[in-house]
Image (cartoon, helix red, strand yellow):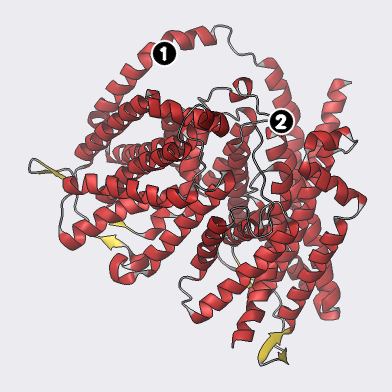
């Protein structure tokens, strides 16, 4: 029973972690809570449904399911990255030097826009994922792990590892340098603007994968999912220490585990509250989050 | 040459937008969007070039300024004799949101503490009256100070632990508090009646007359709003208000000139929440029904948008923001489906063209942040 909950929690947690990465990377560079990030994830889920639906009517799903799923994910990543890129250029870039709360409001505006846009074009009711992945599962230490859960955890792990490796590349180094100090990064020849764009593109791409995975996992999607997932992923990012990439991963997984075990053993009605209770406790003990570095304010 | 470049640019932007919207609108919708944008950008450009702000605009505004408040007051007093119930209803909601925006403006605008869970305090004020009235039969007037003080205490309670945190962490703790409170209201069925909410709340009575009538209630709300504007203005210019602003501008500098940072932050939280409590009790008395539905995170965001839209730290800005965001959806009722869409675009555009808000001072010029 406990192990089953751990597996469920890991599945959920790895999705939170992937979304949280987008928040934490943007925050690390711009110190902006990108409220619209949850909506990108929602768009990813919808894109998954739309494209897989198209492939199903084209007969590709019947011909080769893995190919159809792969193409769906690739297209979802492409479009979400494009949304992330455009969002930054339109709504945040003009506000680089504005008072701190202005980009936040702009982000809220983008979020309201995207939510309602999807509601208008796709309808206000739940959309169903066009393919039900089988209930075939593995028995693993008294727990039943469905193939889908296994693949969600595996894909998330691969994404996190590749992001970690990306941080070591030339571009990754440029990104970290920009996060540390934008002016100095520009002085050593880093194109800060394109690094910021890149951050949004990567974050949105990750959110797209998370969206498609969740849509296939729950089978139902509506235009509100971005808001709830966004809040939770942001909580996960703060829990792990906002700005820190390993922190976001850790925070997401902890959040998922707390939610699933809490829902199973305490009360499922308060499922959404556990995350916040734990968050508040952790912030009071260690205000910079689990893996966040404590930064002294300079005068 | 320049026109050619403009044309190429608008074609690029239009095709990019068409690609982005392709999965959701289909090929036909995307093509329409392409045409609209490709034609729209040059048209907009030429219109903008042709349009120049009237030369004397500024002097006209400054000439009219002293008349603004008296005219506004007379209009506000005369409204019930001129307008129907629908308008009164909308204006009462405006008043309630003005109180909320003013309260949040104290916390966010004066003291510079980002609060993303303000709807929770609004909810506390409403539920205190709802519960006291329906369970114990206590009337509106005794409940008014109880609600306000209770909400202020709740503000303190949240602020005490939260103030150890800075900036965005504080924001997320207030957000968490808001969500937790909403979940408790939703699930604690024996007291709050869960998602079904509390119904049958009594309207206020005054000298034996029920103020349930929209006209009377309008004057009640108007009186409280005017009082709040007066009080908050006085506090803003007092020692406390100046301490808040010093704190907002630079916490370290403020504490180095002897301002007790924690104490003034607590004052800000308590004082801001106080007005949320009053807004809450007014809301409960007007609707006679409350449920957790009315106090979601979206509500907190809406109130915050009012404050920032109007210009953070400016009382009249908060009022203008509240007016605008309550009236705009009503005006756009004709295009019901699209009104939130338009609101979203509007917020983005306003921030791009006037990031300090409608009535905000240009903080960028005054405030040169220390480069970190």
Q: Residue at x 69, y 67 (%)?
A: A15
Q: Residue at x 39, y 48 (%)?
A: B155
Q: Position of residue B232 (x, y in %)?
A: 35, 30
Q: Which image quarter: residue B263?
A: top left
Q: Position of residue B222 (x, y in %)?
A: 27, 33
Within 10 Å of the Cα at label 1, are there few (<14), some (14-19), or many (20+) other Cα atoms? few
Within 10 Å of the Cα at label 2, are there few (<14), some (14-19), or many (20+) other Cα atoms? few
Q: Which image quarter: residue A178?
A: top right
Q: Position of residue B144 (x, y in %)?
A: 23, 45
Q: Are marks 2 and 1 in contact (CB under 8 Å)?
A: no
User: Is residue A255 something that shows in the picture?
Assistant: yes
Q: Is residue A15 above or below residue B158?
A: below
First in sequence: mark 2 vs mark 1: 1
The quarter of the picture where the N terminus of chain A appears is: bottom right
Q: Is residue A192 above or below residue A278?
A: above
Q: Position of residue B276 (x, y in %)?
A: 36, 44
SS at circle 1: helix
Q: Nearer the viewer, residue B41 or B282?
A: B282
Which chain letter goes with mark 2?
B
SS at circle 2: loop
Q: Residue at x 71, y 65 (%)?
A: A210
How far, Cα to Cα, is label 2 from label 1? 38 Å
Q: Are marks 2 and 1 on the same chain?
A: yes
Q: Residue at x 79, y 51 (%)?
A: A201
Which chain letter goes with mark 1?
B
User: Is residue B33 something that shows in the picture?
Assistant: no
Residue at which label 1 appears: B65
Residue at which label 2 appears: B371
- The answer to whether residue B319 is left or right of residue B57 is left
Q: Nearer the viewer, residue B72 or A65?
A: B72
Q: Nearer the viewer, residue B278 or A164?
A: A164
The quarter of the picture where the C terminus of chain A appears is: top right
């Amino acid at each position: 029973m406990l192990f089953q909950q751990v597996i469920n929690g890991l599945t959920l947690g790895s999705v939170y972690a992937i979304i949280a990465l987008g928040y934490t990377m943007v925050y690390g560079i711009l110190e902006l809570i990108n409220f619209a990030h949850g909506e990108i994830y929602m768009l990813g889920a919808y894109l998954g449904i739309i494209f897989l639906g198209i492939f199903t009517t084209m007969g590709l799903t019947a011909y080769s399911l893995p190919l159809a799923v792969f193409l769906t994910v690739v297209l979802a990543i492409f479009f979400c990255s494009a949304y992330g890129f455009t969002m930054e250029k339109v709504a945040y870039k003009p506000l680089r030097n504005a008072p701190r709360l202005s980009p936040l409001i702009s982000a809220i505006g983008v979020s309201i826009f995207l939510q309602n846009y999807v509601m208008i074009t796709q309808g206000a009711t739940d959309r169903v994922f066009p393919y039900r992945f089988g209930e075939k599962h593995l028995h693993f230490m008294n727990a039943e792990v469905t193939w889908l859960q296994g693949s969600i955890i595996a894909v998330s792990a691969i994404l996190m590892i590749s992001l970690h490796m990306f941080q070591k590349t030339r571009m990754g180094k440029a990104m970290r340098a920009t996060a540390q100090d934008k002016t100095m990064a520009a002085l050593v020849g880093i194109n800060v603007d394109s690094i910021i764009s890149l951050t949004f593109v990567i974050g949105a791409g990750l959110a797209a994968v998370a969206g498609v995975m969740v849509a296939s996992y729950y089978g139902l999607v509506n235009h509100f999912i971005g808001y709830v997932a966004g809040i939770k992923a942001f909580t996960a990012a703060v829990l792990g220490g906002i700005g820190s990439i390993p922190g976001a991963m850790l925070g997401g997984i902890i959040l998922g585990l707390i939610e699933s075990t809490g829902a199973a053993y305490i009360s499922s009605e308060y499922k959404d509250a556990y995350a916040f209770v734990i968050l508040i406790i952790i912030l009071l003990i260690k205000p910079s989050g689990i893996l966040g570095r404590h930064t002294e304010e300079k005068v | 040459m320049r026109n050619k470049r403009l044309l190429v640019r608008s074609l690029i932007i239009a095709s990019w937008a068409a690609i982005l919207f392709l999965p959701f609108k289909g090929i036909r919708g995307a093509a329409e969007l392409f045409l609209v944008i490709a034609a729209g950008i040059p048209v907009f450009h030429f219109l903008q070039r042709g349009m120049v702000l009237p030369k004397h605009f500024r002097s006209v505004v400054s000439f009219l300024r002293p008349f603004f408040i008296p005219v506004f007051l007379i209009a506000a007093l005369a409204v019930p004799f001129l307008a129907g119930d629908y308008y009164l209803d909308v204006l009462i909601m405006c008043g309630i949101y003005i109180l909320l925006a003013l309260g949040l403006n104290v916390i966010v605008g004066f003291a510079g503490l980002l609060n993303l869970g303000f709807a929770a305090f609004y909810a506390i004020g409403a539920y205190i009256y709802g519960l006291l009235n329906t369970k114990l039969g206590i009337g509106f007037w005794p409940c008014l100070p109880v609600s306000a003080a209770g909400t202020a205490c709740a503000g303190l309670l949240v602020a005490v632990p939260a103030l150890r945190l800075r900036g965005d962490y504080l924001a997320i703790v207030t957000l968490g508090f808001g969500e937790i409170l909403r979940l408790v209201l939703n699930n604690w069925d024996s007291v709050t009646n869960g998602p079904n909410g509390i119904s049958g709340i009594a309207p206020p009575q005054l000298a034996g007359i029920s103020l349930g009538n929209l006209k009377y209630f309008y004057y009640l709300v108007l009186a409280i709003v005017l009082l709040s504007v007066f009080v908050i203005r006085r506090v803003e210019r007092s020692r406390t208000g100046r301490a808040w602003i010093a704190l907002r501008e630079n916490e370290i500098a403020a504490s180095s000139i002897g301002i007790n940072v924690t104490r003034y932050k607590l004052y800000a939280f308590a004082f801001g929440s106080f007005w949320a409590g009053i807004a809450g009790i007014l809301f409960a008395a007007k609707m006679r029904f409350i449920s957790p539905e009315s106090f979601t995170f979206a509500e907190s965001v809406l109130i915050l948008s009012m404050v920032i839209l109007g210009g953070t730290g400016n009382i009249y800005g908060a009022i203008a923001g509240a007016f605008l965001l309550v009236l705009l959806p009503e005006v756009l009722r004709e295009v019901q489906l699209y009104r939130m869409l338009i609101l979203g675009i509007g917020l983005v555009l306003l921030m791009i063209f006037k990031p300090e808000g409608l009535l905000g001072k240009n903080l960028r010029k005054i405030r040169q942040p220390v480069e970190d």
